[in-house]
Image (tube, grey):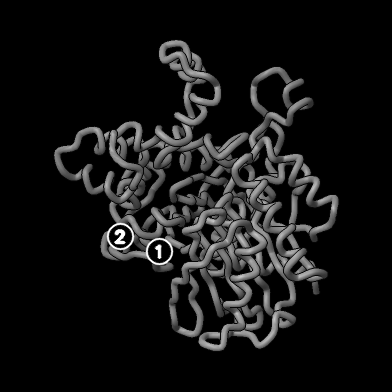
Amino acid sequence: MKILVLNCGSSSLKYQLINMETEEVIASGKFERIGEKESFITHKACGKKVTINHVAMNHTEAIDFTLKQLTNPEYKVIDDLNEINAIGHRIVHGGEKISKPVLVDDKTVQDIKDCIDLAPLHNPAAIMGIEACKKVMPGKPMAVVCDTAFHQTMPIENYIYPVPYEFYEKYGVRKYGAHGTSHMYVANRLAEILGKDIKNLKIVTCHLGQGSSICAVDGGKSIDTSMGLTPLGGIPMVTRSGDLDPSVVTYIMKKENLSSDEVESLLNKKSGLQGISGMAPDFREIELASYGENKRAEIAIKVFNYSIAGYVAKYAVAMGGLDAVVITGGIGENQINIRKGICEKLKVLGVELDEEANDMRGEEKMITTKESKVKVYVIPTNEELMIAKATEDLVK
C-alpha cells in the first residue's frame, strides 16, 4: 500500500509518498509560495533533487503539479496515480471534535472548519488541501490526523483554565496542546528501543523546533502538555512568548496603545528568544551569539533551557516518577549544547549526561550514562509515518 501524506500551510504544501510495506519514503518535497507568480516546488525522488519554478495560484494547482512529478518519466516512482491507495492530511487543530484519526467526510470537514478560530492560519489551509484532493483525485480515500488528538486523554484538571467555567462551555476555552503526532511517535519509538510495554513507562517528550512543546506521557497517554488553547503557550520559542503573567499583555497594550490583534501578533512573531535577544528569528544564530559577548542572546538561551527543564521536573511530579526523557524536533535533534544545558539542569532528577554520546546530530541515541537514574534519548521525529500508519489502518 502507498500512502500520500500532505501537510498544507497557508502558502505551502509539504508531502511524502510512503510505501507502507517497507515504510520507505519513495518521494517527498515542498511546494512554496502558493498563490504567487514566484511559486516553486522542490522534489526528491530516485536519489535526485530538483527545483522547478511553476506558477500555482491555489492548492488545487499545486497538488495537481505535485502529482505529475510522481509520474514524471525522469524520476517517476509510480506509473499511475491509482497506485496511491489513500491520502493522509495533517491537521493542526481538531479541538474536542476530533479526538482520533478519522476518515474524511462532510462532518469531518465541518469539524475542522468549526476549529478555525483556534488555528486561523493552519486549519483553512488544511481544508483547501482536502478540497483540492477531491478535485484532483475524486473518490480517493482520505483521512485526517490532528496534532491536538493525542492530548485528548488529559484529565480535566490538567486542561481546564481557572477562568469562569462558562467560557469553556461557550467558547471551548481550555488547553488543547500541539505536536501530538510527534509526541506519540517518539514515545512509542522509545518503548520499542527499550523493549518495554509503553503502558509501564513514564516519559517526558520534548519537541523542540521553531514551535516547541513538552508532554507528559504516562502509560502511553498524554496527561499534560505545555502548549495551551493555541500554540502560543508553554515554553518560550524562537518568536513566541510562551507562558506569561496575563497582566503583561494588558499592561503592554495600555503602554503601547496596541489593539488585541497587534499584541497577539507581537507575542506570536516578535517575542520569545527573538524578543529577548533582539536578533533575527534564527535559533542557530541566537545560540551562536550566546557563546560570545551578546549577553541578551545568552539570557535568551538560559531562559529556554530553564523553562524546558522546569516542565520536565513538573511532569515527573505529575506522573509520580520518570523513566526517560526524549528530545526531538529540529533544535532538539541537532543542537548539542542545548541538550547539554537541559541535562545539566536535570541533575537533580538523577540525569547524568554522556558528553561523548551527546556529540552528534540527527541520530537516534541515548545521551546519558548507563548509571543515569533517568535516561535521556534523542529520537528524530517522524510525524508523516504516524499519519500514514493511521491512514492505512482506517482504509484497510
Q: Is residue 30 above or below residue 335?
A: below
Q: Residue at x 58, y 70 (%)?
A: 16
Name the spot of residue 219 as percent of width and height, x first.
64, 53
Name the spot of residue 330 as percent of width and height, x first.
42, 56
- Residue corresponding to mark 2: 354
Asked if residue 221 can be seen in this view, the reply is no
Q: Residue at x 46, y 13 (%)?
A: 257
Query: Relative to residue 32, is residue 275 drawn left or right?
Result: left
Type of the residue with mark 2: Asp
Numbered mark located on residue 80 in the image:
none
Is there CB contact under 8 Å for labels 1 and 2? yes
Type of the residue with mark 1: Met
Q: Is residue 187 above or below residue 85?
A: above
Name the spot of residue 372 as percent of width and height, x first.
38, 56
Q: Earlier in the sequence, mark 1 or mark 2?
A: 2
Nearest the viewer among 253 and 152 is 253
Q: Residue at x 54, y 52 (%)?
A: 203
Q: Residue at x 60, y 64 (%)?
A: 62
- Residue corresponding to mark 1: 366
Query: Relative to residue 119, is residue 259 drawn left or right?
Result: left
Residue sitting farthest toward the front = 37
Q: Is residue 383 above or below residue 228?
A: below
Residue sitting farthest toward the right = 106
Q: Estimate how packed mark 2 is, as few (under 14), some (14 to 19) or many (20 or more) residues with alpha carbons within 10 Å.
A: some
Can you tell which quarter of the image residue 281 is in?
top left
